[in-house]
Structures are given as structure tokens and as C-alpha cells.
Image (cartoon, helix red, strand yellow):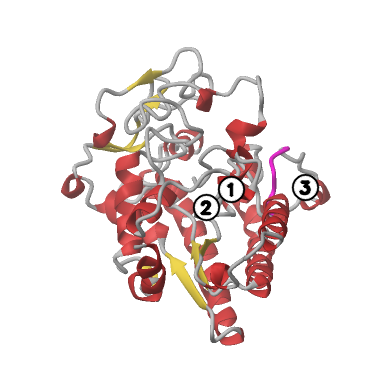
Amino acid sequence: MSDNGNLLKSIGNTFHPVKYLPYGETYFGRPTGRFSDGRIILDFLAEAYGLPFIPPYLSGTTTDDFPHGANFAYAGATALSDSFFESKGIVPYGFYTLDAQLQWFRNFLSSILEQPGFDSDYLNNALFVVGEIGGNDYNHPMFDGRTLDEVRTFVPYVINKISLTIKELISWGAKTLLVPNIFPIGCNPIYLTTFQTKNKEDYDPNTGCIKRLNEFIEYQNAELSKELEKLRQLYPNVAIIYGDYYAAAMNIFRNPEKFGFSYPLVACCGAGVGPYNYSSLAKCGYPGYTVCSDPFKYVSWDGLHVTEAAYKLIAYGVLNGTHSSPPISNTCSHIMHDSA
């Protein structure tokens, strides 16, 4: 959801569909490493504060390559370590975990602290976006056949890992942090296809999403919200903002036509078969895929990630304060002023 090129920079000559069109077709006209047809939430946040798009950390070699910050997110990453999954009998997935991303940040911070004339207000005036992270801790095991009840037991560990990360960032000087929750997975074509049933009771009659999957994410998000409130009590001088991506996305799924979406549960780029246009045998960018002619009418881009049109609405919902608590528009006014 948040990676804008780190995976792309790390895989060298290895094949990956994100290296090729149609990824990036809508806005950039070329693949950029973003798992969408265009811009993602981070891009809209940067635009709102008058900044250029923030480069992926692995795209630079010196601090001069990051005048306005860096993005450390890595597609497919988990919050939890490989050793955690090994302890559960789950084969690790080989992505850069949150620990690895945090180490990238430490390296980055060490290099900028060494710069002559370093402004100590650099971190105080920065916006730290911590996530969305945690979704892969759940979807990888679920796609491997682990039950929802088992995966539910992972939630406290994921929340604790996010909390520890926030505490470390604060120890380095972070004063403003946006911590997003997880999207409603029960509305994703990959989940709708993988966990499809004939029982109408399994589906929300208003949205068509799988109820038990979204209820699980609501539980995880509620736990995250409670943890952030504890952190606010510990750090009263730090602004910790809860970004409600879930509510922003559900607003779209409940009112798709209001926002111009004709196909809220169908992947724009996918297999060309089935009610959700998704198949693991012909994913977007792999042989046999098809791509829609108008991504602006679709919420889902490739079955797991959403389109630029959907990201834009979610980002604006967070930016205008409707889906951020406390409202990001008030909390981050100093950042907008400093970047103007």
C-alpha cells in the first residue's frame, strides 16, 4: 500500500509485474514501483503539504537525494519478524520486515545527523507516517490455510510491534506521527475470491463484502486505536494521529456510485474471469491478465491494492479530518506552513 519503489529497487533483474505497465499507467504513464495504476496515499499527503513526491529510500545514495524525506515502506512486509512466523510453523516470506525498515531509518538518520549545519528542528517538524503495516501479517498466513481464529492471536503481537516502533521514533525526536489502520480486507477481490461461499449470510447485504473478515480487521483496528491512546498518555507533547483508512474505504464501498465507482468489488487488472476478476493463476501483470479501460470506475486495481481514484478519496478523508483523529489538518498545520 505504501511502497513507492523500494521493492522495485531491491529485486534487480528478477521478474515482477510492478516493473511493467499497466502498473503506473494512469498518472505516471510508466511503472514506478507503486502497486497501483497511479499515485498512492503518500503521494497525496506530500502534495497536500506542498512537497514533491517522497523518494523510496533504496533509490538514493546520499542524503542529498532526500531533501524532503524518505519512504522506507516495502511491499509485502510484515510487522512481525521471520522468527515469529517460524515459531508458528509458518515459512517466512522473505520480505524486509518492519525491523529492517526501522534499521534503514536509523542508517538514514545517522547520515543526516553527520551533515554540517544540521537543523535540530528537522525531526520536530517532520510528519512520520507509520504504516499501514500489519495486513501482511494476517493475509500471508490466511492464504496459506491458517484459520481466522489462529491469525486473530497474532494481533497483540502486531500491535505491540507497532507501539515499540512508535516509541523508538519518538526517542529519536519525532513529534508528529500518523498511524493508519488496516483496509477492509473483506472487500478485496483476492479475499472475495479465495474465501468465496454460497452462504448469503456471510456477506454484508449493503456492500457485498465478507463480514467475518471485516469484523476481524475492525477488531485489529480497535486494538490499534486503544494502543495509540495509551501512547498519547505516555507522550502528551507528541501528536499521535490515528488514520482511519478502514472507515474512509468503507465509505466508498457503502456509497460507490456517489464517488463515481461502477465496480467497487471487481479488480480493474486481473484474470478476466469470475465475479471479481481475480485468479491466482492470472494476476495483474502475469500471462493471461486483462486490464479495464477506465480505472476511475474501479476501487480495486489488482485485487489486493486499490486504484489511484480510491487512494485519492481515502487520502483526502484523512487530510480533511473526517478520517483522522485528532484531525490531521489541525495537528499538522505547522508542517504545511513550513513547506509553503
Tell me the amino acid under the disc marked 3: Asp
Q: Which residues are magenta?
A: 94-98
Residue position marked by numbered label 2 in the rendering:
67
Tell me the amino acid under the disc marked 1: Asp
- What secondary structure is marked by label 1? helix
Q: Are marks 2 and 3 in contact (CB under 8 Å)?
A: no
Q: Who comes first in sequence, dot 2 or dot 3?
A: 2
Q: Is residue 8 above or below residue 156?
A: above
Q: Is residue 284 above or below residue 85?
A: above
From the viewer's side, name the closer residue of 198 and 22: 22
Image quadrant assignment for residue 166: bottom right
Instruction: Give the class, few, some or many, for how many residues have Cα within 10 Å of label 1's Cα (few <14, many ≥20).
Output: few
Residue position marked by numbered label 3 in the rendering:
82
Q: How far apart in space, not on screen, are marks 1 and 3 (Cα)? A: 33 Å
Image quadrant assignment for residue 335: bottom left
Inspect this view and state whether residue 279 appears: yes
Residue position marked by numbered label 1 in the rendering:
64
Q: How far apart in space, not on screen, are marks 2 and 3 (Cα)? A: 33 Å
Residue found 35% across the figure and 56% down from its top = 50
Q: Going by the image, does 158 lie left or right of 186?
A: right
Q: Is residue 308 magenta?
A: no
From the viewer's side, name the closer residue of 165 and 182: 165
- Quadrant where the C terminus sits is bottom left
Q: How far apart in space, not on screen, are marks 1 and 2 (Cα)? A: 6 Å
Tell me the amino acid under the disc marked 2: Pro
Q: Position of residue 2 (x, y in %)?
A: 50, 47
Q: Going by the image, does 282 lie left or right of 43?
A: right
- What secondary structure is marked by label 3? helix
Image quadrant assignment for residue 228: bottom right
Q: Going by the image, does 292 lie left or right of 52?
A: left
